[in-house]
Amino acid sequence: MEPVTLFKEKYHVELSDVDFKKNLKLSILFNYFQDVASDAAANLGAGIDVLQKSHGLAWILMRIRVDITRLPQWNEEIMIETWPLEPKRLEFERDFLVKDQNGDVIIRAISSWVVMDLEERKLKRTESIGLTYPENIEDRAINGKLGSLRKHGPLETAYRRIIGYSDVDFNGHLNNSKYVDFLMDCFPIEDHMKSTVKSLEVNFVNEVLPGETIVLYKDTSKRDENRYYIEGMNENSSRTVFKAMAEVAGE
C-alpha cells in the first residue's frame, strides 16, 4: 500500500462493542483509535513489528482528548480518519475524526504519543525512528492543546482494582482502553442512565504492571458544571497512574 498521511479505516459497531444503551463504549472507541493509529503507522513504515524488531521500541499513548457530538450505535458503520502532525522532540501528535455514514463528523480527537525502549522502559526522541510523511497536514481535529489536568476539590475513593491477565496488552502493561473502563466504573449505573460523556481528556502518567493495584479516586466538586475529575494511583508504588477530566450532558 502506498504511504499516505491521511489514513482512513471503516468500522462496524458490533453488539459486543456497545453498552446497555446500545451506544459504543468509550473503551472500545479508544481501541478503535489505537488500532487505526497502529495501521496508519504501519502504512508509514513505523508499525509495531518494525519498531520492535528494528529499534526495540513501542508506541505509547501519553495524552488524548475526545470531543463527542454523539456516540455511534450498534450495527452502525463509521469511518475513522487520522493524520499525524510534524513530530516534536519527544512527542508524535495524531488527530482523529469519526464520521457517520452520511459523512458527518460525530467525534473529534487529538492525541500525543511517544516511543519507549522496551528493555530500559525509557522514552526515546522522535528522531530515533526516522519517521517521515508524504505530506504535512496542519489542520487540527480540535483547536487546543493537551495539557496537565488538576483536581478542583477533595478526592473520594471510588474503588480498588488489581491488574490481571485481561487488562494487559502486548507491551506487558495496562492497556490505555482499560483505563477508560476503570474511570467509567467510578460512577454508578444510575449516573450513566441519566447522562453521557461529551468530552474526555486523559493523561497517562505511569505504566501499571500485572499484579499491581490501582486505587481510583474521583472529584465531584464541579458536579453542578457537569465536570468530573478522576485519578488513578498505583497502591504499590504510590505513583499517579493517570488523570482524567470528563464533561457530561443529560439525555
Image: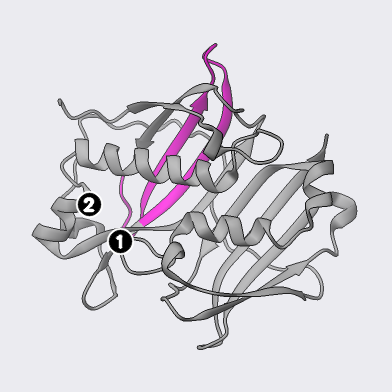
Across and down, in percent, residue 230 comes to 68, 65
Q: Is residue 111 magenta?
A: yes
The residue under the point 66% across, 29% down is 70
**Residue type indicated by callout 1:** Phe
Q: Which residue is mark 1?
A: 170
Magenta segment boundaries in residue numbering: 85-113
Q: Are marks 2 and 1 in contact (CB under 8 Å)?
A: yes
Please state the horizontal and vertical placement of residue 32, each as a whole percent of the image.
Answer: 44, 40
Residues packed near mark 2 inside 10 Å, few (<14), some (14 to 19) or many (20 plus)? some
Residue topped by disc 2: 48
Amino acid, disc 2: Ile
Q: Is residue 9 left or right of residue 145?
A: left
Q: CA distance from mark 2 to mark 1?
A: 10 Å
Q: Residue furthest top?
A: 102
Q: Secondary structure at mark 1?
A: loop
x, y (%) of residue 147?
A: 56, 58
| Above or below for 117 versus 104 | below
Q: Residue at 83%, 34% (x, y): give it.
A: 251
Q: Nearer the viewer, residue 133 or 105?
A: 105
